[in-house]
Image: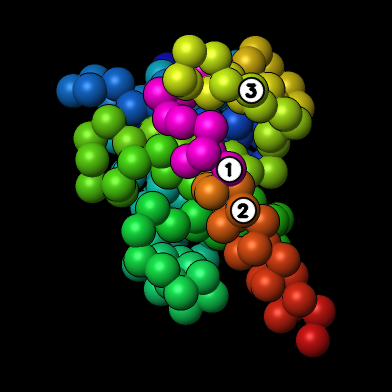
Amino acid sequence: MFQNSYEINSKTNSILAITGKGSIIFEGVKEIYNPKKPQAIINHSCKYYGSTYDGRLKTSQAILGTKYKLPIAISESKDIIMFPTKSFYDDTCSWISFNNIVKYEEINNKVCIYFKEGSPQIFDISLKTLEIEILRASKLLLILKSHNEE
């Protein structure tokens, strides 16, 4: 399936960068090809849900107290949190949905992630890096939820 415009949603598992060719979005059992880079899809989705990437980034920085490879709350009301595999500005950066991870395991210095729906995917990151990203994303979600309940 080919799609030019895409909004991240609760079924989005990951957005993989295809160098020079856009992205493949894994949404449940569907694979969607998009000519835009993952960064553009992240930007568009933040705007779709009422903010900007920069606004979401500043929120993550304030909550987590760090500035590098931060998870982003794409939609606070839907609890959609995505985190990057590399720097946002790296053309090979892919994004993973924190909310859809069921389990993960290390395979040959890479990580295989199993999602609620769809096939498992292998990412070229270390187990330690993934666990740090999951910890940051869970902290971000927990703090956002506690602020929304006040």
**What residue would you read off at disc 1?**
131
Q: Secondary structure at mark 2?
A: helix
Residue 86 image point, x, y percent: 34, 41
Which of the two labelled residues, at mark 1 and mark 3, occupies the earlier sequence position? Answer: 3
- Residue at 38% x, 53% y: name it: 69
Tell me which corner region of the image, top left, top right, bottom left or bottom right, holds residue 141: bottom right
Which of the two labelled residues, at mark 2 and mark 3, occupies the earlier sequence position? Answer: 3
Let me know if residue 128 appears in the view: yes
Task: List the single residue furthest toward the bottom.
Answer: 150
Task: List the single residue furthest toward the right.
Answer: 149
Is the residue 69 above or below the residue 123 in the image?
A: below
Label disc, if present, on residue 9 of the rendered structure: none
Is the residue 97 above or below the residue 54 in the image?
A: above
* Mark 1 crowdedness (10 Å alpha carbons): few <14, some 14-19, many ≥20: few
Is the residue 63 above or below the residue 127 in the image?
A: below
**What residue would you read off at disc 2?**
135
**What residue would you read off at disc 3?**
105
